[in-house]
Image (cartoon, rainbow, N blue to C red):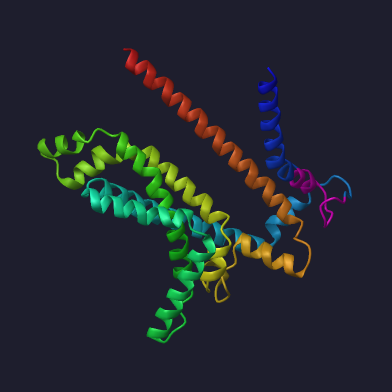
Amino acid sequence: MVKKIFGQCYIWIILLLMYLPVLVLIAFSFTEATNVGEWTGFSFNLYPRLFQSEEIMVALGNTVLIAVISALLATIIGSLGAVGAYYSKRKWRNAIDLATQIPVVNAEIVVAFSLTVMFVFIGNIVNAYIFSFWTLLIGHMCLSIPFVYISVKPKLQQMDPSLYEAALDLGASPSQALGKVIVPEIMPGVFSGFMLSITLSLDDFIVTAFTRGSGLLSGDKKIETLSTLVQAKIKKGPIPPEMRALTTILFILVVVAVVGVTFYRNHQSKKEKVRRAF
């Protein structure tokens, strides 16, 4: 009984520490005070001001664009890499597994600095400044691909290995067998890898700060994302209060997405149980 009470209290304390700062920001998104902790009266004015702030909207647009593009490319490359490694010889599969695990446990600053050195080296060879949207995209992809690989690999291991050979024996080409047999089997892992890539890209700061250049919605200026914008504002003074409204909107969207995915998976699980029963 004591262990149960202690366990429940521990869980609630952890949840409180995780969500209390977010709840505080949500509460203070309904006041126009510059600093959190000051209350100048209940107001919704931060929300229309958020969408009127060109600086924040540009940073938000850049963040979403780079997240979606890098996640799509990382998901394709990581998924194909996982499939290729799964059907490779053991020594090659073990080597690829090791190579993909290193970036996961490695410090992000090492990845960012390594990419910067590589881009500077290439720039010296071609005698040009190459930092741009493309270097930023490569940086975010390098950050996400190992996590996609790790998400897809377990689904491949759970799959019946004879399905691919059976499809080939029935006359399917390798590409048809890949698209109609393997991809449906690993789709949950692919989706998990894609969502994880989106999350990693959205909140990344170190790789972004080291590899960004001009492009996207920032035009000729350095690409500004939400993380770099917040860091720049902290240097000069308080964070714009409109960011609290943006935090609230993002939090609500995430909660809705998680609840929706949970209900969908539960519905699919019930349908699968009914199908198996008959």
Q: Is residue 77 left or right of residue 141?
A: left
Q: Residue furthest front?
A: 2
Q: Over which residues does the magenta segment extend?
A: 24-38
Q: What's the residue at 36%, 57% (across, down)? A: 99
Q: Is residue 271 left or right of residue 156?
A: right
Q: What's the residue at 77%, 44% (across, down)? A: 24
Q: What's the residue at 40%, 21% (across, down)? A: 271
* Quadrant position of the N terminus in the picture: top right
Q: Residue furthest bottom?
A: 127
The answer to which of 49 and 222 lies nearer the viewer is: 222
Q: Residue 191: in sight, yes or no? A: yes
Numbered disc total: 0
Image height of 267 relative to 234, above or below: above
Can you tell which quarter of the image residue 158 is in? Answer: top left
Q: Position of residue 11 (x, y in %)?
A: 66, 32
The answer to which of 182 and 152 lies nearer the viewer is: 152
Q: Position of residue 73 (x, y in %)?
A: 39, 56
User: Does 26 appear in magenta?
Assistant: yes
Q: What's the residue at 68%, 51% (across, down)? A: 246
Q: Position of residue 79 (x, y in %)?
A: 34, 49
